Amino acid sequence: MNARHRRARLSKVPAAGLASLLLAFLLASSASALPLFTAHAIVNGGEDLRTGSISAGAEVHFDSVGFHAFGGALASPFGLHASGSASVNNGLTDGRAIATARFDDFVIHGPAGPVTTSFNLVISGSLGVLIPTVTGDAQAQATGAVIVQTAVNDLIVTADGFFQDRVRLFGLSTSLGSSVTVQKTGMLAGWPGGNGDFAIHKFTTPTFTVNVDEPFTVEIQLTAVGGAFGFIVPEGVTSEGFADFGSTLAFPTTGAVFNLLDGYTVESVGARIAGNAFVGEEPGEPGPGPGPGPDPLPGVPEPASLALLLAGAAVLAERARRRRRERA
């Protein structure tokens, strides 16, 4: 299901003087590279691609007689949000969204030598298909799919082959009957949700090996796709497919982020991780409706979040100063 190009509006993020100053302090304290966030929304006839070092948001709608498609993505340190949906009477359409976060400043501290590890992620959302009953030569199809991809130092870390960590629902209706098939693979093989059900799934990446006390890159990507197809379907009857992950793919907010042996820890200013724990939280929760939830990236952290970030900043700054003294 290919999509073409049209520019659409960007979801606005309010200006935040305090948050900007805090980010500058964190980066200056540890000499870290800025993270890179990418949001990409694609529908039939439309595309929006945005990048940023604090957040990125993209959104496209396509509406015509008998057609509807939506793609919306938001990427920030607090998680990745992506939703794609489509409905059609006769014809083919889809909506898709891709949110990506790249952090170049992860560092594992501990005894000398390489370390083999993995990290944990939490994904929440829903996907589903709705197909009508048809007769004769008519045919209706719908797809809802979510894909997760992770990479370390630009090497894909996957449990089941390239781009196969996914959940895909496919609905088909012909004069012979209708069916919905489900495919769950790789890191998402344990996805607990059914057709249209909201669910939460915590999973762990396969292991990888990095050097201790050397920065490495972590990239996570969330793709959501909704597609629909109809052939000589009666007027007014539609096929619908959606993947609504306007909730989050994110590092866990409680417990360890990385799976490390005693004596090791991990930090990343860009990802808000210190002492192998996530130290920034997102005020409010995105709603589960179609598309990204309301106001998912506030301009200024709430006091509790700000205190956690400042505490993490102090820890990272002290470690950076200690490393500089040791090298002197």
Image (spheres, rainbow, N blue to C red):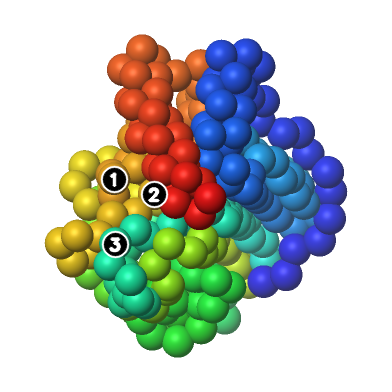
Q: What residue type is labelled 1?
A: Gly
Question: Label 3 belongs to which residue?
Answer: 110
In front: 251, or 42?
Answer: 251
Q: How far apart are marks 1 and 3 (CA)?
A: 12 Å
Q: In this rendering, would 121 be left or right of 58? A: left
Crowd tier of the residue under label 3, counting other residues whose Cα lies within 10 Å: few below 14, some 14–19, many 20 or above? some
Which of label 3 and label 2 is nearer to you? 3
Crowd tier of the residue under label 2, counting other residues whose Cα lies within 10 Å: few below 14, some 14–19, many 20 or above? many
Q: Distance between the residues labelled 3 and 2?
A: 12 Å
Question: Label 1 belongs to which residue?
Answer: 275
Which badge, 1 or 3, comes first in the chain's sequence?
A: 3
Q: In this view, which residue lies farthest toward the left?
A: 262
Q: What element carries label 3?
A: loop
Q: Which disc, if any, is residue 2?
A: none
Q: In this rendering, would 21 be left or right of 134? A: right
Q: What element carries label 1?
A: loop
Which badge, 1 or 2, comes first in the chain's sequence?
A: 2
Residue pictured at 71% horizontal, 45% vertical: 51
Which badge, 3 or 2, comes first in the chain's sequence?
A: 3
Q: Where is residue 255 in the image (x, y as percent from the top left)?
A: 19, 47
Q: Is residue 299 visible?
A: no
Q: What is the quadrant of residue 107 in the picture? A: bottom left
Q: Which amino acid does label 2 sit on?
A: Glu
Q: What residue type is labelled 3?
A: Gly
